[in-house]
């Protein structure tokens, strides 16, 4: 929840260094659990932030904003495919001779 009492969906388990995220996309968690956009710059070099899920969601059509975000989106897409796969692939019937 934001300072204005609005809800925002943040990417779970993702807290990049704030200086790697453009100011208008940095969400900082406050001590009371609320979040706010951290547009102050430059941020402390060790400050972590959160990003909105819509930026990392592989189902959304967005431009490549940052190289690491493009990688995160690709990994999220792979994770969804793995989770939807009913069973892992079967090993080959004949293993190659490794000597």
Image: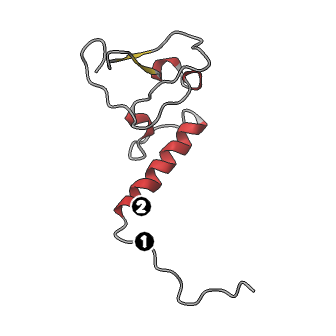
Residue 74 at what x, y percent from top left? 51, 49
Label 2 sits on residue? 82
Q: Quadrant of the N terminus?
A: top left
Q: Quadrant of the C terminus?
A: bottom right
Q: Quadrant of residue 85?
A: bottom left
Give the numbered dot on residue 75. none
Q: Secondary structure at mark 2?
A: helix
Q: 67 above or below 27?
A: below
Q: Residues within 10 Å of mark 2 (few under 14, many from 20)?
A: few
- Judged from this view, the residue extending furthest toward the bottom is 94
Q: Which residue is rendered at x = 34% and y = 69% of the image? A: 86
Residue 56 at what x, y percent from top left? 44, 39
Q: Which residue is rendered at x = 53% and y = 30% of the image? A: 16
Q: Are marks 1 and 2 in contact (CB under 8 Å)?
A: no
Residue 71 at what x, y percent from top left? 55, 44
- Viewer-side residue, 7 vs 63: 7
Label 1 sits on residue? 88
- Judged from this view, the residue extending furthest toward the right is 99
Q: 22 above or below 58?
A: above
């Amino acid at each position: 929840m934001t300072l204005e009492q609005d809800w925002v969906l943040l990417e779970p388990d993702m807290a990049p260094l704030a200086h790697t995220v453009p100011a208008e996309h940095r969400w900082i968690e406050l001590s009371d659990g609320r979040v706010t956009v951290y547009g102050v710059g430059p941020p402390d070099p060790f400050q972590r932030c959160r990003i909105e899920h819509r930026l990392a969601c592989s189902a959304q059509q967005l431009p490549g904003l940052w190289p690491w975000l493009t990688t995160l989106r690709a990994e999220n897409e792979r994770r969804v495919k793995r989770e939807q796969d009913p069973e892992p692939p079967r090993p080959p019937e004949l293993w190659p001779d490794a000597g």
